[in-house]
Amino acid sequence: MIFENFENILMDNINNKISEIIKLKTKHNGSLKELLFTNERYSKQSICIKIGNYLETAINKFVDEKYKPTKTLKDAINIIRDKQNYDIQIDLIFEKDGVIYYREVKSNTNLDTEKTKATYKKVTDIEKILKSMGYNVNSKVLSLRFCNQSDINGYIKKPFKGTDYFEGYGDFFRIFDINITEEDWTNIFDKIRNLIHETIN
C-alpha cells in the first residue's frame, strides 16, 4: 500500500532518532513532585513537539517521492520569500495536476488567539501572492490530530471560523487517492507510544 510507504518513512526516522526524541529533563523546579512522580522525568510537551516535527518531515518526504519540485514551484517559493521580506518557513508545498498545494502543518489544532491570527495571516498572504502570479492554488491548514475537516469544527476560531481552510490528515491523503481512517492513524501512534514506553522503561 502507498500509505505504508509514508508509515515506513515516519517509523524509520523515529526509530533512528528515539534517543534524541526522549531526553531527561535537565532543569529542576525545586518541587517534591520531582521526587514523588519520577515517571515525569521526561517532558511530554517536548516529545510531542519532536514527534510532530518528524511527522511533518515524513509527509514532505512522502510528497517529494511522488512530486519532485518543479521549476515553477521553486520560482513561486522564491517570489513568496521575496515579497514577504523574510525567510518564511513553508511547511509543505507541492504541485500536482497544475495546482499548487500549500499546507501549514499543525500538530496542535487548538491554537490560542494570537497563534490563530498569525497562522491565518500567513496562509492568506501566501495564497494571495500565489494567486497574483496566476497560479491555481489550494491552501489549507493541515491538522495532524484529526482525520476530517468536520472533526475540527469545534476547535476552529476566528478568523478561520466559517472558512474551509482547515483539513484533516484523511482529507490530505485523499489528494493522492489514498483513504486513511482514524484507526489507521491511531495504529501508527500506538507503535510510536510503545516505542517511547520501551525506551523510557
Image: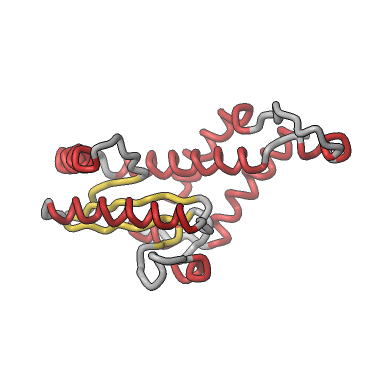
Whether residue 176 is visible, yes or no, is no
Foreground residue, 36 or 196? 36
Q: Position of residue 105 (x, y in %)?
A: 42, 49
**Point 56% across, 35% down: residue:** 14
Q: Position of residue 43 (x, y in %)?
A: 68, 38
As displayed, is residue 84 above or below residue 13?
below
Q: Is residue 18 left or right of residue 84?
A: right
Farthest residue, direction left: 134
Dividing the picture into quadrants, the one containing residue 165 is: bottom left
Foreground residue, 110 or 147? 110
- Classify the position of the C terminus by image quarter: top right
Q: Is residue 27 left or right of residue 110?
A: right
Q: Position of residue 12 (x, y in %)?
A: 53, 34
Q: Position of residue 8 (x, y in %)?
A: 50, 40
Foreground residue, 97 or 50? 50
**Point 49% across, 40% down: residue:** 53
**Point 71% across, 28% down: residue:** 27
